[in-house]
Amino acid sequence: MSVITIGILGILAVLLAAQLKGIRGEYGVYLAASAGLVIFFYGTARLETILDAIRQIQSCIRINSVYLTALMKMVGITYVAEFSAGICRDAGFGALGSQIEIFGKLSILAVSMPILLALMETIQGFLS
């Protein structure tokens, strides 16, 4: 699906959800969440193209695969956390969405710690 198709799908889901909100509010939330899941899974289908490009970059430049793996984990964590937090906010649970975002940020920090430690060791090696 192209970006235009996904955009149209999102707009139609929002318009239908707005119409259903007046009748049965929970159906609007279900519809918006369902459309969000469809868009999410079509977005994850694009990851194969991105992974192929990263593999090509890695073959051209001598980069440790640990760094690229950590980068992809960070992108995945960000994507899932933002998606989940958005659904929570749309359902009226903004506090829960904020908690998911905080957990996502802490998870990214945890994934990036080995890279930060390797950088510190490299700097320390230059200084001594």
Image (spheres, rainbow, N blue to C red):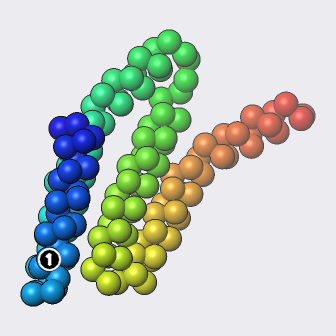
- Please give the name of the residue rendered at 40% of the width and 81% of the height, measured from the top-left corner: 94
Q: What is the crowding at mark 1: few (fewer than 14 residues within 10 Å), some, or many (at least 20)?
A: some
- Left or right placement of residue 122 versus residue 24 in this view: right
- Left or right placement of residue 23 versus residue 69 in this view: left
Answer above or below: position of 28 versus 80: below
Q: From this viewpoint, is residue 70 visible?
A: yes
Quadrant where the C terminus sits is top right
Answer above or below: position of 77 versus 47: below
Residue type of the residue flagged with mark 1: Gln
Quadrant where the N terminus sits is top left
Q: Residue furthest right?
A: 128
Q: Residue 30, position in %: x, y?
A: 14, 74
- Please give the name of the residue rendered at 43% of the width and 55% of the height, measured from the top-left corner: 78
- Please give the name of the residue rendered at 48% of the width and 42% of the height, measured from the top-left corner: 70
Answer above or below: position of 78 versus 115: below
Q: Residue 48, position in %: x, y?
A: 27, 31
Q: Residue 85, position in %: x, y?
A: 37, 70
Q: Residue 97, position in %: x, y?
A: 39, 75
- Left or right placement of residue 41 versus residue 111 in this view: left
Q: From this viewpoint, is residue 45 visible?
A: no
Q: Residue furthest top?
A: 60
Instruction: Tell me where residue 100 sits by quadrant.
Output: bottom left
- Please give the name of the residue rendered at 19% of the width and 75% of the height, measured from the top-left corner: 18
Q: Nearer the viewer, residue 12 or 77?
A: 12
- Left or right placement of residue 57 versus residue 16 in this view: right
Image label count: 1
Tag 1 residue? 19
